[in-house]
Image (tube, grey):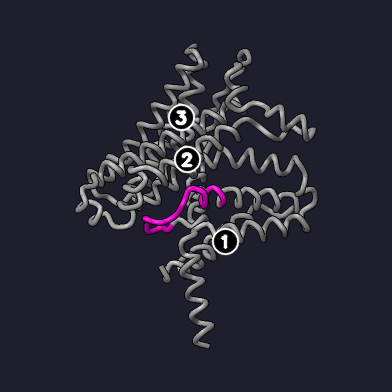
Amino acid sequence: MGIIADKIAITRHRLSYFPEVVVLISFSLLFLFFSFFAPHFLTALSIGNILTFGSITGIIVIGVGILMISGEFDLSVGSNFALSSYVLALSINGGIPVIPAIFMAIIVSTFLGFVNGWIVTRTSIPSFIATLGTMLAYRGIVRAVGGGNFASYKGEDIPLFKILNGDFILLNSWFQVQAFRTSMIWFALLAVIFIIILMRTRFGNWVFAVGGLSAAARAQGVNVNYVKVMCFTITGFLVAIASVLQFSHRLSVDPLRGDGIEMIAVAASAIGGIRLTGGFGTITGAILGVFLLQMLDQGLVLMGIPIQVFQACIGLIIIISVISNTYLGRSS
């Protein structure tokens, strides 16, 4: 028994260095389940929907994941997402050229992320509470700016929108579907860039240090407040990119756009192995988490199961993932 216990401890110790292991196993099991029991799951249309819809949310998850590794949360990303979309829509409808309008949307959303970071670092209010407040405030601004109405663009076709989130002609032609969109390319590029930043740069090391033990990081000369504000600002920037890509496809926005996306982002990050206490996790794991949730949504729809079951499954998967990651983390 002692030898078996030692082997289990060694295995736990090794697995604790790979935060993606739990979500990878869960992803594989869920994929196999839906492959057998969900009609038309293994089709280009179904896989394309998972990748396309997951790519928009995935861009936001990249920012939220980095922020959680730094030990903070941002519950305002959904409201910020909607506000950025309204800024873009109203700017274009007001006669502003599309490129300046996109820059305006990005600047506004990035600034709101900066505001979140400034509030948290200057007041020492827990980010969960601070961004809960800004979530409500930003959503109120959305309703005021939009007047509670849809904002739609109905003018001439904008070629840039087709580049940002148009048909992925190569894949759609190959599989004879209309499910793949170019947002997948931008998501992949952003994922690679921020994985490199987090894992191969000094700033990435600072993020892990600040999330792991901010007092020790400060003692080593790390500007903790700067790192946290930057993480909030990056999150705002990525929210803007996601909103621009989605608007490029739908060409409209409503007051409830992005509602609940903050919970999906936090759930994907937690499922992907990012510890809620900060200091540990990877963007790769968070990305696997968001595609797991998107696959779950797609699979349940194909099986004709109500959306309420999807929400219950998310809660169950979060609990199991956190318990599993905590169990593995005890050996590190």
Query: Residue 279 lies in magenta, yes or no?
Result: yes
Q: Say whether disc 2 or disc 1 marks the residue closer to the N-terminus.
A: 2
Q: Is residue 35 above or below residue 185?
A: below
Q: Which residue is mark 3?
A: 84
Q: Residue at x 71, y 29 (%)?
A: 170
Near mark 2 (Cα within 10 A), the count class, few <14, some 14-19 or many ≥20, is many
Coordinates of residue 241 in the picture (x, y in percent): 49, 31
Disc assigned to residue 78: 2
Q: CA distance from mark 2 to mark 1?
A: 22 Å
Closer-to-camera residue (183/129): 183
Which of the two discs, 2 and 1, sits closer to the camera?
1
**Disc 3 residue type (three-letter):** Ser
Q: Secondary structure at mark 2?
A: helix
Give the residues in magenta: 275-288
Q: Quadrant of residue 227?
A: top left
Residue 223 percent location from the top left of the image: 23, 44
Q: Is residue 157 left or right of residue 5?
A: right
Tell me if 126 is positioned left or right of 31 in this view: left
For residue 76, what is the image quadrant? top left
Residue 269 in percent (x, y) is at: 49, 52
The percent coordinates of residue 129 (x first, y second) are 34, 50
How dense is the environment of label 1, judged by Cα within 10 Å: few (below 14), some, or many (20 and up)?
Answer: many
Q: Label 1 belongs to which residue?
A: 317
Tell me the crowding category of disc 3: few under 14, some 14 to 19, or many 20 or more residues within 10 angstroms, Cα based.
many
Sequence-wise, the earlier of marks 3 and 1 is 3
Please, which residue is most extreme toward the bottom here? 1
- Up-down relation of residue 105 to residue 32 (above or below): above
- Distance from label 3 to label 2 (Cα)? 10 Å
Q: Nearer the viewer, residue 295 or 25?
A: 25
Q: Secondary structure at mark 1?
A: helix
Q: Find numbered disc 3 in the image and state the secondary structure of the residue it sits on.
A: helix
User: Where the C terminus falls, by quadrant?
Assistant: bottom left
